[in-house]
Each structure stands twice: as structure tokens, then as C-alpha cells.
Image (cartoon, grey):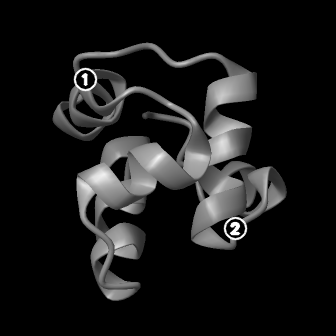
Amino acid sequence: MNLQETFRTRRKSLDLSQQDLSEMSGISLATIKDIERGKANPSIATISKIMDVLGMEIAYRVRHTNIEE
């Protein structure tokens, strides 16, 4: 599962809209949408803010990434 799929799946499992995630993370709605579409290359700081809201850790993402991705 790639970054955008991970974020989208987790966000939906928490019953959060993209707008909710934007407001809670302080990341613009446009950026949230672009990340979930795979159209953005977010910084580690942006990823960290989103993962905090989603209750995830960066270490989780690193452990579950395939080398080929």
C-alpha cells in the first residue's frame, strides 16, 4: 500500500473527511487532496502532521513499504 492509499484508508476508517483532516492537521485542503491523488510530494513535516492526526507513526510507514514502491 502506498502513502496515498494508507492515508485515505486510515482517514476513512476514522470517519474523517478531507476537510476534517485539513483542519485538524493544519495542512491545506488542496494539499490533502493532492496527496490522496498521488499528485503531491509532501515533506516529512507534512507527513508527520497528517500521521499525528491519523494516530500513526512514521516508523509504521517505513516498515510497511516495499522496496519496489
- How many C-alpha atoms fall within 10 Å of the one at disc 2: few (<14), some, or many (≥20)? some
Report the amino acid beneath label 2.
Answer: Met
Look at 17% across and 33% down and name the residue there.
37
- How many C-alpha atoms fall within 10 Å of the one at disc 1: few (<14), some, or many (≥20)? few
Q: In this view, does 11 lie above or below 21?
A: below
Task: Of the two numbered discs 1 and 2 on the same chain, state the one appearing first in sequence.
Answer: 1
Report the amino acid beneath label 1.
Answer: Ala
Looking at the image, residue 24 sits to the left or right of residue 3; the answer is: right
Look at 78% across and 61% down and name the residue there.
57
Q: Is mark 1 on a helix, strand or loop?
A: helix
Residue 11: image location, x then y, percent = 37, 69
Look at 46% across and 48% down and name the residue there.
23
Q: Name the residue under label 2.
A: 56
Residue 39: image location, x then y, percent = 22, 17
Q: Which mark, residue 20?
A: none
Looking at the image, residue 60 sits to the left or right of residue 54; the answer is: right
Confirm whether residue 69 shows in the render.
yes
- Which quadrant: the C terminus? top left
Q: Which of these two is toward me, 4 or 22? A: 22
Residue 28: image location, x then y, percent = 40, 26
Q: Mark 1 points at which residue?
A: 30
Toward the left, the furthest residue is: 37
Looking at the image, residue 55 sits to the left or right of residue 23; the answer is: right
Q: Is residue 33 above or below residue 65?
A: above
Residue 54: image location, x then y, percent = 58, 67
Q: How far separated are the C-alphas under marks 1 and 2?
A: 21 Å
Look at 72% across and 58% down and name the residue there.
52
Confirm whether residue 5 shows in the render.
no
Q: Which one is closest to the eye, mark 1 or mark 2? A: 1
Q: Quadrant of residue 22?
A: top left
